[in-house]
Amino acid sequence: IIILVVLFMLSLLIGRYDLSLKDIFNILIGQNATDIQKGVFLNIRLPRTIFVLIAGCALSLSGIIYQAIFRNPLASGDILGVSSGAAVGAIIGILFFNSSPWAIQILAFVFGIIVVLIAICLTKFMKGSKLYNLVISGIILGALCNGVIMYLKYIADPQRQLASIDYWLMGSFHSVVWLDVISMCCIVIPALVILLILHKQISILTLSDDEATSLGVNVKYMRFFIIILSTLIICCIVSIVGIISWIGLIVPHLARVFFKGSFKQTLIYSILMGGIILLAADLVCKSISQTEVPISVLTSVLGALALIVFMIKRRG
């Protein structure tokens, strides 16, 4: 928690226009602060930092829930094609709606949800384990979406649209405003609270279906409900800032490595570590060079390195 608070404060202080603790204090009490300082802090730095914190916590929670529900340590938001579906919607918004922020966000959100619903419907026509079939359906739909993405990039105007598409796919928090924070919180915060309340049921779903049923859990409907809530969280965040890679996959593993405990404790540690890691990554991205580095560039590198270390350590 101390690390989280320190990183939160550093994120408020560091950027292209540096602020001091004294400047922030003056802004909060309304004394001796310039209009530029007020604008940077209240309209740029504060909403961005709050969004990054909540996004890191939410993506990590979704990741650990996906891994628990699918009983797969490599499960993440991409396993059902959520990110790929959202990317298709966002690219359609860029190509056919003049890069309207509202069109991009709404279409990304809707397409992400649609892909998951299609994956769930496909399992009804497949024989065998529903859980296994759901994973396979997600992989298939993710591949189809990636094909659509490549075609849409192929027909995009290389002068006006292609750069916007690539930048969105790499993710960035640079354009976050208060309206984005509010719209995210309206979906993400209630979903987070519900998922935390249901931690016992989620823990039971890590058992076999017969064991979970014997413990009084309606496996079919509870799993569907939890998957939809987790997907809503990912779609909401991705639709606003683009794809944020690896956070949902790596953070739960780090929480298990550093903090041994019950599922509930691991859940809480994952939430805190997700906020810490994404705040730290965003801090590096906006201060490492003159131009801001997209967030997924850094999280992909760090995530891949962390996964390599984890797999080597696990094998040993």
Image (cartoon, rainbow, N blue to C red):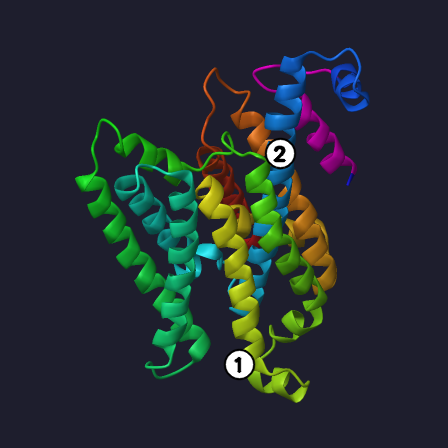
Which residue is painted at 68% across and 21% down in the image?
13
Q: What is the quadrant of residue 61 in the picture?
A: bottom right
In the picture as drawn, the residue positioned furthest to the left comes out as: 155
Which residue is painted at 47% across and 47% down in the image?
238
Q: Main secondary structure of the magenta part?
A: helix
Q: Quadrant of the N terminus?
A: top right
Type of amino acid under label 2: Pro
Which residue is painted at 27% across and 33% down in the image?
161
Query: Residue 305, image x and y in percent?
Result: 49, 40
Query: Residue 11, image x and y in percent?
Result: 65, 27
Q: Would residue 14 be visible to someone looking at this image?
A: no
The reply to whether callout 2 and callout 1 are in contact (CB within 8 Å) is no
* Residue 152 falls within the magenta-colored stretch: no
Q: Which mark is residue 220?
A: 1
To which residue does mark 2 refer? 47
Type of amino acid under label 1: Lys
SS of the residue at dot 2?
helix
* Residue 162 placement, left or right of 5: left
* Residue 79 placement, left or right of 59: left
Position of 39 relative to 4 (above/below): above
Q: Which residues are magenta?
A: 2-20
